[in-house]
Image: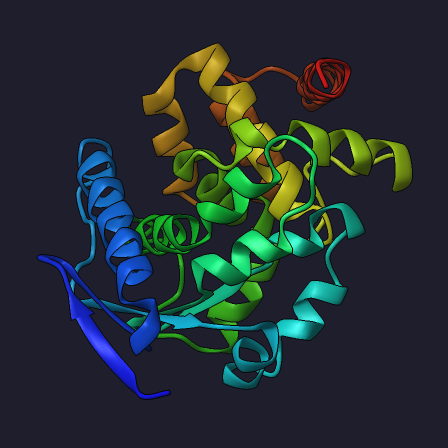
Amino acid sequence: MPWVESISPSFRARHESADADDADRVLMSLEHARDRLAELFPRTPSDLTVVLHRDSTSLSLSNPTLPVRRLMTAPAARRYIAGWAAGEELHVLAPAALEARASNVPGSLEMLSLAAVSLYTRRVIAENNRDLPRPYSPARLAAEVRWAWLLDGGAGWFSGQTEHARPAIARRLREGGRPRFPPSLRDAPLLGGTVIDLLAREEGERAAVRFVTHLHPQGARGALAAAFRGRALVHTEGAWRSHLARIASAV
């Protein structure tokens, strides 16, 4: 089946011809996300291309490191690793494939339907974070790994995925042992957003924006101390663990 291109004011999509209607919906969701994020972030990139893949094989062939990334992620979050971004492209499963991947628990389909928006949101956060090394380099990759909990967490929270993640978070707490604080690379896609959620609840959305667009020179401890107004890390960790318990108990 031939690949074709669809265009919206700020984005374009490459997809199989049978997926034209789905592509239009994805483009519309990205336009809405860009409008919303523009109210919070100074720079919201446009002229990006989203490539819609009809199955996991096609997506993995577009980036052979993606299956490795999925394996490095906690089992409760693996199904939500549904795309990747680099340069001016976002690669993600097409809506029908995302629907097929969803589990039958509440929130799963909603999280997956936001996959493209989450990838774009992470790009927006990176674009506005001047502490990330530029251009892309081994130093940039090392920073993204070190700060995955912040970058992935910001993408999840500002895209709206975190609010649908309660069942997945409850599963992670049942199956995976005690998570680190801040979350490890393995837990960053699922639990990183809960750190942002706690901050937004305590200090407001603008504080969350400042948090995700700055890498503190003293690392995670410095970032968390500054964001939570100098509160000792042990107390912030306690508040976060209580927040996780509340999330899990609400399922």
- Residue 143 visible? The answer is yes
Figure quadrant of the C terminus: top right
Residue that lies at the very extreme toward the left in this rendered image: 9
Of residue 100 and residue 192, the one placed in the foreground of this image is 100
Residue 47 falls in image quadrant = bottom left
Q: x, y percentage for residue 15?
A: 33, 75
Q: Which of the 4 quarters of the picture holds residue 224?
A: top right
Looking at the image, which residue is at 35% across and 32% down? 209
Task: State how the image is colored.
Answer: rainbow
At horizontal 60% and vertical 80% (from top left) the residue drawn is 57
| Relative horizontal placement of residue 77, taking residue 109 as reference (left or right) | right
Residue 250, compared with residue 145, is above or below; it is above
Query: Is residue 168 depicted above or below 54 in this figure?
Result: above
Nearer to the camera, 108 or 139: 108
Q: Is residue 115 left or right of residue 48?
A: right
Give the number of callouts: 0
Q: Is residue 153 visible?
A: no
Between residue 28 and residue 219, name the one nearer to us. Answer: 28
Q: Residue at x 44, y 64 (%)?
A: 94
Residue 30, above or below 33: below
Q: Please tell me whether residue 155 is drawn above or below residue 56 in the rendered image.
A: above
> How far across and down, in percent of the image, does residue 126 sit?
36, 54
Picture quarter with the N terminus:
bottom left
Which residue is at a point 58% across and 79% down the rendered structure image?
Answer: 60
